[in-house]
Image (cartoon, rainbow, N blue to C red):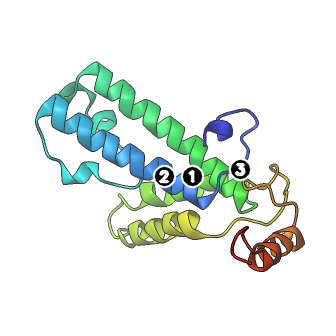
Amino acid sequence: MFSMFKWPIGRCGRGAMFLWLALGSLGFSAIKFFAFQQIDIGAIQFGFRSGALTHPAAFPLWYVALEAAFDLALIVVAIARLHDIGKPGWWLLGFVGLAGLAALPGLSILVVVALVLWLALLFWPGTFGPNAYGPHPLGWESREHYERQMRELREHVPPGKA
């Protein structure tokens, strides 16, 4: 799961990204509960955090730094996920740009578009086998290799079951 935190950024499967987002959301919920005695449903989110970064004077410095570190790590995970589907990391600027444009009057529908793109990034299957950004996260060399492994698993009879 942490192999994506190297340069150049490699690939990240759907499961690793979902796990990163879920654990991050649960972690921030726990931190807000124990540090600030708040149950904040808004802390349970699957995306970037902005509360402490947009209003840093309202939070302790350690929390602002933690939120910034989480967002930077999430950028790396999102770029690795884009790499897994064969797209360059620069596409992430489009996601962020859409969310930023949604703040303008009359363009609030762009929030929905950005959400759909974020969900597509989370659920879109990666390319089989190696691509320009590295080997497949699960080790498959090609679609044929994957299908051969699945066929062998279906045909395999565990010891003692024959």
Q: Residue furthest top?
A: 61
Circle 2 sits in a helix, a strand or a loop, which is it? helix
Pointer 1 local density, CA inside 10 Å: few below 14, some 14–19, many at least 20: some
Query: Residue shown at 31%/37% (left/top)?
Result: 54
Q: Residue furthest left?
A: 37
Q: In the picture shown, does residue 74 fall above or below 17?
A: above
Between 52 and 32, the residue placed more toward the observer is 32
Taking the image as shown, residue 141 lies to the left or right of residue 33, namely: right
The answer for how far apart the CA atoms under marks 1 and 3 are is: 10 Å
Between 148 and 97, the residue placed more toward the observer is 148
Mark 2 or mark 3, earlier in chain: 3
Mark 2 touching mark 1, by CB under 8 A?
A: yes
Pointer 3 local density, CA inside 10 Å: few below 14, some 14–19, many at least 20: many
Circle 1 sits in a helix, a strand or a loop, which is it? helix
Residue that badge 1 annotates: 16
Q: In the picture shown, does residue 15 fall above or below 30?
A: below
Image coords of residue 151 (percent x, y): 81, 78
Residue that badge 2 annotates: 19
Instruction: Using the rendered image of the protein, determine whether residue 124 is visible from the camera's viewpoint.
Output: yes
Three-letter residue code for mark 3: Arg
For marks 2 and 3, give the one nearer the viewer.
Answer: 2
Image coords of residue 123 (percent x, y): 56, 69
Three-letter residue code for mark 1: Ala
Taking the image as shown, residue 134 lies to the left or right of residue 126, namely: right
Taking the image as shown, residue 93 lies to the left or right of residue 116, namely: right
Pointer 2 local density, CA inside 10 Å: few below 14, some 14–19, many at least 20: few
Three-letter residue code for mark 2: Leu
The answer for how far apart the CA atoms under marks 2 and 1 are is: 5 Å
Mark 2 touching mark 3, by CB under 8 A?
A: no
The numbered dot on residue 11 is 3
Query: Residue shown at 35%/58% (left/top)?
Result: 103
